[in-house]
Amino acid sequence: MARYRARIEYDGTDYYGYQRQRDDQPTVQGAIEQALSQITHHPIVVTGAGRTDSGVHATGQVISFDAAWRHSTEDLQRALNANLPADIVILQLDETTTTFHPRFDARRRAYAYHIYNTAVRSPLRRQRSWHVSQPLDVALMNQAAACLVGVHDFATFGQPPQGDNTVREVFTARWQRQEELLVFFIEANAFLYRMVRSLVGSMKAVGDGRWSIAEFEAALHACDRHRSGAVAPAHGLYLVSVTYGE
């Protein structure tokens, strides 16, 4: 029996999030576990670094699982990808230490959020980005993003896991315009539930002129969930990387 660590990518459109559900709704974890059981003929539990919500995508989710596999890791990766649905893929697979935990060992996580900022919506981007038709001021949105860097109490913008606090350290937060696409990148030691989407919705309010920078800062320091802007749609969010200490 060995422990394996994998970096995976998935389109979250047709899944009820990463984590397996009690009512057998399709999930990313469930699909991977089903593929593993088909290959190994044994039930296998998969652990993930981040429990992405329904509709959220990933280009760099990290998972681990224990399996008795007599062949190479390359063969296991090929077998998994052959048995997984087309919207999930194993990008990298390695054997790791038996104590590795993708969630608890993570030092940093990074997310990206895509806003398609143009007057005419794109059917091809409708499950990959949030369509916002009114012009957004990226310079103002970057001023708001700069307020997030450092150690702050983010209670306004998310809910903690049970028994945890709402203080997080943000290392990087920035917006970049790529033609019609606005991309928000944020890296932190950890995130609260719906934190990135709440931040995006609030910074969008800055970008369209409904909030000032002072109002955004006041909302951050209020530590009041009711002071957040609207929660941005799930389909614009991507888990892009998880960083470990090695």
Image (spheres, helix red, strand yellow):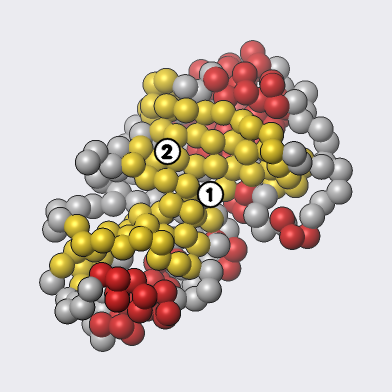
28 relative to 95 in the view: left or right:
right
184 relative to 207 in the view: left or right:
left
Amino acid marked by disc 2 = Phe
Q: Residue furthest top?
A: 214
- What x and y, as percent, mark residue 143? 62, 18
- What x and y, as percent, mark residue 235? 62, 53
- What x and y, as percent, mark residue 191? 42, 38
> At 79% across and 55% down in the image, what residue appears?
122
The residue beneath circle 1 is 238
> At 33% across and 42% down in the image, what residue appears?
243
Of tags 2 and 1, the one toward the viewer is 1
**Observer-nearest residue: 23 or 71?**
71
Q: Residue furthest right?
A: 119
Residue 167 found in image quarter:
top left
Element carrying mark 1? strand
The residue beneath circle 2 is 191
> At 49% across and 76% down in the image, what residue appears?
85
50 relative to 97 in the view: left or right:
right
> At 66% across and 25% down in the image, what residue appears?
141
Amino acid marked by disc 1 = Tyr
Q: Quadrant of the C terminus?
A: top left
